Amino acid sequence: MAARAVCGLILTGTSLTSWALLSIGAVGWMAWLRERHRLIVVLLAVSFLGAGAVLGSDAQDRALRTPLRALLDSEIGGFSIDTPEPGTRHDPLAVRARLIEDASQGSGVTTLRASITSVRLRRG
């Protein structure tokens, strides 16, 4: 399992942070072999902090740069996360969605969480 994780780090075009975590793991392995317990605890804390930062950054990127946003930006324009203004006005699009959770009712609004599975674009 660890070998797959290391190969995944190497093969996916890693960043400096990923290489630093890999180096900390190697130093941790050597510290474990030499029974340096305090160093192991420090390296574990640093590596968990680094891994949390990498995972958090990836989750933020996936949440902000969704495939639906990319599709709308390429087909209609103005939906890029990098543009500060709202998206371009357009006619409603037909979508197929899968419900994620039940609807909830608030003050004057009902919300429904769904995952978009397909979008029908009108080209013409």
Image (cartoon, helix red, strand yellow):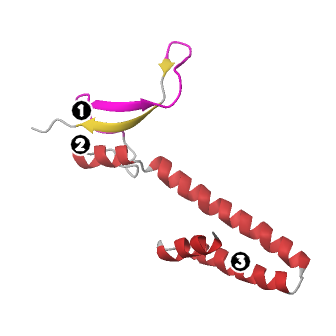
| Residue 25 marker | 3
Residue 92: x and y in percent read 26, 28
Q: Residue at x 66, y 64 (%)?
A: 51
Q: Which residues are magenta?
A: 86-109
Residue 81: x and y in percent read 40, 49
Residue 35: x and y in percent read 89, 83
Q: Residue at x 21, y 37 (%)?
A: 121
Q: Residue at x 33, y 49 (%)?
A: 70
Mark 1, Cα crowd under 10 Å, few <14 / some 14-19 / many 20+, is few
Front-lying residue, 72 or 96 = 96
| Residue 76 marker | 2
Task: Measure how far apart labels 2 and 1 are at the Cα level.
Answer: 8 Å
Q: Residue at x 23, y 45 (%)?
A: 75
Residue indicated by mark 1: 90
Residue 99 counted in the magenta span: yes
Mark toward the start of the polypeptide (3 vs 1): 3
Q: Label 2, secondary structure: give it.
A: loop
- Residue 89 versus residue 28 in the image, above or below: above
Q: Amino acid at mark 2?
A: Ile
Q: Label 3, secondary structure: give it.
A: helix
In the rendered structure, are the residues bearing label 2 and label 1 in contact, judged by CB atoms less than 8 Å apart?
yes
Front-lying residue, 81 or 54 = 54
User: What secondary structure do most residues of the magenta stretch adopt?
Assistant: loop
Q: Amino acid at mark 1?
A: His
Residue 5 counted in the magenta span: no
Rendered image quadrant of residue 120: top left
Front position among marks 2 and 3? 3
